[in-house]
Image (tube, rainbow, N blue to C red):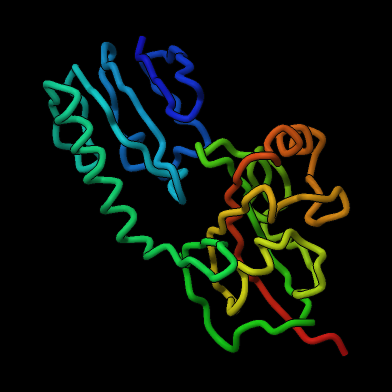
Amino acid sequence: MAIHLQGGLSGSVTTQPAAFARPEHCRSCVLCAAAFTKRSVVLLSNSMLFGPFVHTVSAVFEPAYAADGKRKYFTNLEEAREEGERRREEKDRAEGPIISLPSGVKFRELNQGSGDPISVGELCSVSYTIYRLNGLYLDSLGYGKEGKDDLGETFTFQYGSGQVPKAIELGMEGMRIGGKRRILVSPEFGWTSTQLLPFPTSSAAERRLNNSKKQPLLFEVELVKSRLIP
Protein backbone atom coordinates (compact mmCIF):
# COMPACT_ATOMS: atom_id res chain seq x y z
CA MET A 1 0.00 0.00 0.00
CA ALA A 2 1.13 3.57 -0.65
CA ILE A 3 0.46 6.26 1.90
CA HIS A 4 -0.80 9.55 0.59
CA LEU A 5 -0.91 12.44 3.06
CA GLN A 6 -2.68 15.47 1.67
CA GLY A 7 -1.74 18.81 3.18
CA GLY A 8 -4.54 21.15 4.11
CA LEU A 9 -6.67 18.23 5.29
CA SER A 10 -5.63 18.39 8.93
CA GLY A 11 -3.02 15.71 8.40
CA SER A 12 -5.57 13.10 7.42
CA VAL A 13 -4.07 9.83 6.23
CA THR A 14 -5.54 7.58 3.59
CA THR A 15 -4.10 4.40 2.16
CA GLN A 16 -4.17 3.76 -1.55
CA PRO A 17 -3.62 0.52 -3.48
CA ALA A 18 -0.44 0.09 -5.48
CA ALA A 19 -2.27 1.20 -8.63
CA PHE A 20 -2.37 4.78 -7.36
CA ALA A 21 -5.61 6.48 -8.43
CA ARG A 22 -5.16 10.22 -8.67
CA PRO A 23 -8.09 12.32 -7.45
CA GLU A 24 -9.85 14.58 -9.92
CA HIS A 25 -7.90 17.71 -8.93
CA CYS A 26 -4.58 15.88 -9.43
CA ARG A 27 -5.14 15.04 -13.09
CA SER A 28 -2.71 17.71 -14.27
CA CYS A 29 -0.35 17.63 -11.32
CA VAL A 30 3.27 17.04 -12.30
CA LEU A 31 4.07 15.13 -9.14
CA CYS A 32 0.90 13.05 -8.99
CA ALA A 33 1.65 11.92 -12.53
CA ALA A 34 4.48 9.85 -11.10
CA ALA A 35 4.17 6.08 -10.94
CA PHE A 36 4.96 5.27 -7.32
CA THR A 37 6.34 1.93 -6.26
CA LYS A 38 4.35 -0.34 -4.00
CA ARG A 39 6.21 0.73 -0.86
CA SER A 40 6.51 4.40 -1.72
CA VAL A 41 5.78 6.79 1.08
CA VAL A 42 4.73 10.16 -0.22
CA LEU A 43 3.89 13.15 1.92
CA LEU A 44 2.12 15.78 -0.10
CA SER A 45 1.18 19.29 0.88
CA ASN A 46 -0.78 21.63 -1.35
CA SER A 47 0.54 25.04 -2.22
CA MET A 48 -1.33 27.73 -0.29
CA LEU A 49 -2.55 29.99 -3.07
CA PHE A 50 -3.58 29.48 -6.68
CA GLY A 51 -2.02 26.04 -6.80
CA PRO A 52 -4.70 23.37 -6.39
CA PHE A 53 -3.02 21.42 -9.18
CA VAL A 54 0.48 21.53 -7.74
CA HIS A 55 1.73 19.54 -4.79
CA THR A 56 4.91 19.86 -2.82
CA VAL A 57 6.61 16.59 -2.05
CA SER A 58 7.90 16.45 1.50
CA ALA A 59 9.43 13.01 1.48
CA VAL A 60 9.87 9.97 -0.69
CA PHE A 61 11.80 7.14 0.87
CA GLU A 62 11.41 4.67 -2.01
CA PRO A 63 12.35 5.18 -5.67
CA ALA A 64 9.63 6.85 -7.74
CA TYR A 65 9.38 7.90 -11.36
CA ALA A 66 9.05 11.58 -12.15
CA ALA A 67 6.94 12.85 -15.04
CA ASP A 68 9.99 12.75 -17.34
CA GLY A 69 10.42 9.01 -16.71
CA LYS A 70 13.64 9.37 -14.72
CA ARG A 71 13.91 7.63 -11.37
CA LYS A 72 14.13 10.01 -8.41
CA TYR A 73 15.56 9.20 -4.98
CA PHE A 74 15.19 11.34 -1.86
CA THR A 75 17.20 10.45 1.19
CA ASN A 76 15.86 13.06 3.62
CA LEU A 77 12.91 15.37 4.18
CA GLU A 78 14.81 18.56 3.38
CA GLU A 79 15.97 17.30 -0.01
CA ALA A 80 12.45 16.23 -0.94
CA ARG A 81 10.99 19.53 0.28
CA GLU A 82 13.44 21.54 -1.83
CA GLU A 83 12.61 19.49 -4.93
CA GLY A 84 8.91 20.04 -4.35
CA GLU A 85 9.43 23.79 -3.91
CA ARG A 86 11.46 23.93 -7.12
CA ARG A 87 8.69 22.24 -9.09
CA ARG A 88 6.04 24.47 -7.53
CA GLU A 89 8.00 27.58 -8.48
CA GLU A 90 8.42 26.33 -12.05
CA LYS A 91 4.67 25.77 -12.28
CA ASP A 92 3.97 29.24 -10.85
CA ARG A 93 6.30 30.89 -13.37
CA ALA A 94 4.63 29.03 -16.23
CA GLU A 95 1.16 30.17 -15.13
CA GLY A 96 2.14 33.81 -14.72
CA PRO A 97 2.17 36.27 -11.83
CA ILE A 98 -0.52 36.76 -9.20
CA ILE A 99 -2.22 40.13 -9.70
CA SER A 100 -3.39 42.02 -6.60
CA LEU A 101 -6.11 44.66 -7.03
CA PRO A 102 -6.54 47.73 -4.76
CA SER A 103 -9.66 46.04 -3.35
CA GLY A 104 -7.52 43.18 -2.06
CA VAL A 105 -8.89 40.71 -4.61
CA LYS A 106 -6.21 38.54 -6.21
CA PHE A 107 -6.23 36.54 -9.42
CA ARG A 108 -3.93 34.75 -11.82
CA GLU A 109 -4.49 35.22 -15.55
CA LEU A 110 -4.18 31.82 -17.18
CA ASN A 111 -5.17 32.99 -20.67
CA GLN A 112 -5.56 36.60 -21.81
CA GLY A 113 -8.13 35.99 -24.54
CA SER A 114 -8.68 38.43 -27.39
CA GLY A 115 -10.88 41.30 -28.48
CA ASP A 116 -12.22 44.16 -26.40
CA PRO A 117 -12.41 43.85 -22.60
CA ILE A 118 -15.85 43.41 -21.07
CA SER A 119 -17.67 46.48 -19.80
CA VAL A 120 -20.29 47.09 -17.13
CA GLY A 121 -23.79 46.11 -18.25
CA GLU A 122 -22.72 43.42 -20.73
CA LEU A 123 -24.13 39.90 -20.55
CA CYS A 124 -21.24 37.55 -19.90
CA SER A 125 -21.42 33.80 -20.51
CA VAL A 126 -18.81 31.80 -18.61
CA SER A 127 -17.77 28.28 -17.76
CA TYR A 128 -16.27 27.82 -14.31
CA THR A 129 -14.84 25.51 -11.67
CA ILE A 130 -14.85 26.15 -7.90
CA TYR A 131 -12.21 24.70 -5.59
CA ARG A 132 -11.10 25.00 -2.00
CA LEU A 133 -7.49 26.14 -1.53
CA ASN A 134 -6.41 22.57 -0.82
CA GLY A 135 -7.64 21.55 -4.28
CA LEU A 136 -10.89 19.94 -3.18
CA TYR A 137 -13.40 20.16 -6.03
CA LEU A 138 -16.70 21.85 -5.13
CA ASP A 139 -18.65 22.55 -8.31
CA SER A 140 -18.32 23.38 -12.00
CA LEU A 141 -20.19 24.08 -15.21
CA GLY A 142 -19.13 23.44 -18.78
CA TYR A 143 -16.38 20.85 -18.32
CA GLY A 144 -18.19 17.54 -17.85
CA LYS A 145 -16.77 16.98 -14.36
CA GLU A 146 -18.29 14.41 -11.98
CA GLY A 147 -19.88 12.71 -14.97
CA LYS A 148 -22.17 15.69 -15.65
CA ASP A 149 -23.51 16.11 -19.18
CA ASP A 150 -22.71 19.82 -19.30
CA LEU A 151 -19.72 20.03 -21.63
CA GLY A 152 -19.71 23.44 -23.29
CA GLU A 153 -22.56 24.83 -21.18
CA THR A 154 -22.27 28.34 -19.78
CA PHE A 155 -23.69 30.49 -17.02
CA THR A 156 -24.84 33.99 -18.07
CA PHE A 157 -25.06 37.07 -15.88
CA GLN A 158 -24.99 40.83 -16.28
CA TYR A 159 -21.53 42.10 -15.45
CA GLY A 160 -21.49 44.88 -12.85
CA SER A 161 -25.02 44.23 -11.61
CA GLY A 162 -24.07 42.53 -8.35
CA GLN A 163 -25.55 39.17 -9.38
CA VAL A 164 -22.33 37.29 -8.53
CA PRO A 165 -19.95 37.56 -5.55
CA LYS A 166 -18.00 40.81 -5.42
CA ALA A 167 -14.65 39.04 -5.77
CA ILE A 168 -15.76 37.51 -9.09
CA GLU A 169 -16.88 40.83 -10.58
CA LEU A 170 -13.72 42.59 -9.44
CA GLY A 171 -11.53 39.71 -10.58
CA MET A 172 -13.12 39.61 -14.04
CA GLU A 173 -12.53 43.28 -14.79
CA GLY A 174 -10.76 43.63 -18.14
CA MET A 175 -11.35 40.03 -19.26
CA ARG A 176 -11.64 39.30 -22.96
CA ILE A 177 -13.35 36.53 -24.93
CA GLY A 178 -11.44 33.28 -24.48
CA GLY A 179 -9.73 34.59 -21.37
CA LYS A 180 -9.36 32.46 -18.27
CA ARG A 181 -8.59 33.55 -14.70
CA ARG A 182 -8.25 31.89 -11.31
CA ILE A 183 -9.74 34.28 -8.75
CA LEU A 184 -9.30 34.11 -4.99
CA VAL A 185 -12.75 34.54 -3.41
CA SER A 186 -12.44 35.58 0.23
CA PRO A 187 -15.44 34.93 2.52
CA GLU A 188 -16.28 38.64 2.85
CA PHE A 189 -16.32 39.01 -0.97
CA GLY A 190 -17.87 35.60 -1.62
CA TRP A 191 -21.32 34.03 -1.36
CA THR A 192 -22.54 36.30 1.43
CA SER A 193 -26.16 35.87 0.31
CA THR A 194 -28.14 32.85 -0.89
CA GLN A 195 -29.31 35.00 -3.83
CA LEU A 196 -25.84 35.34 -5.33
CA LEU A 197 -25.10 33.41 -8.52
CA PRO A 198 -24.09 30.95 -9.76
CA PHE A 199 -26.28 28.57 -7.82
CA PRO A 200 -24.87 25.07 -7.15
CA THR A 201 -25.41 22.67 -10.05
CA SER A 202 -26.42 19.70 -7.86
CA SER A 203 -27.46 18.85 -4.32
CA ALA A 204 -23.99 17.40 -3.67
CA ALA A 205 -22.37 20.61 -4.88
CA GLU A 206 -24.72 22.62 -2.68
CA ARG A 207 -23.64 20.67 0.41
CA ARG A 208 -19.96 21.10 -0.44
CA LEU A 209 -20.32 24.83 -1.04
CA ASN A 210 -22.35 25.38 2.13
CA ASN A 211 -19.62 23.65 4.11
CA SER A 212 -16.91 25.77 2.48
CA LYS A 213 -18.30 29.27 1.99
CA LYS A 214 -16.77 30.58 5.23
CA GLN A 215 -13.26 29.97 3.90
CA PRO A 216 -11.36 31.36 0.88
CA LEU A 217 -12.22 29.62 -2.39
CA LEU A 218 -10.79 29.56 -5.91
CA PHE A 219 -13.12 30.45 -8.77
CA GLU A 220 -11.59 29.51 -12.13
CA VAL A 221 -13.59 31.30 -14.81
CA GLU A 222 -13.43 31.18 -18.60
CA LEU A 223 -15.18 33.93 -20.56
CA VAL A 224 -16.90 32.21 -23.48
CA LYS A 225 -18.84 35.16 -24.90
CA SER A 226 -20.20 38.59 -24.03
CA ARG A 227 -22.71 40.94 -25.59
CA LEU A 228 -24.35 44.27 -24.94
CA ILE A 229 -28.00 44.28 -23.90
CA PRO A 230 -30.08 45.77 -26.76
Q: Describe residue 115's horizontal placement relative to residue 93 as left or right.
A: right
Q: Position of residue 224 (x, y in %)?
A: 65, 71
Q: Describe residue 82's horizontal placement relative to residue 170 as left or right.
A: left
Q: Quadrant of residue 136?
A: top right
State the residue in front, 214 or 69.
214
State the residue in front, 146 or 8.
8
Quadrant of the frame with the N terminus: top left
Q: Residue at x 63, y 43 (%)?
A: 145
Q: Residue at x 58, y 76 (%)?
A: 175
Q: Position of residue 152 (x, y in %)?
A: 68, 60
Q: Quadrant of residue 142?
A: bottom right
State the residue in front, 3 or 79.
79
Q: Residue at x 65, y 61 (%)?
A: 167
In the rendered view, tell whether residue 221 sits above or below residue 115.
above
Q: Describe residue 217's horizontal placement relative to residue 160 as left or right.
A: left
Q: Position of residue 24 (x, y in %)?
A: 53, 36
Quadrant of the frame with the C terminus: bottom right
In the rendered view, tell whether residue 63 sits above or below residue 111.
above
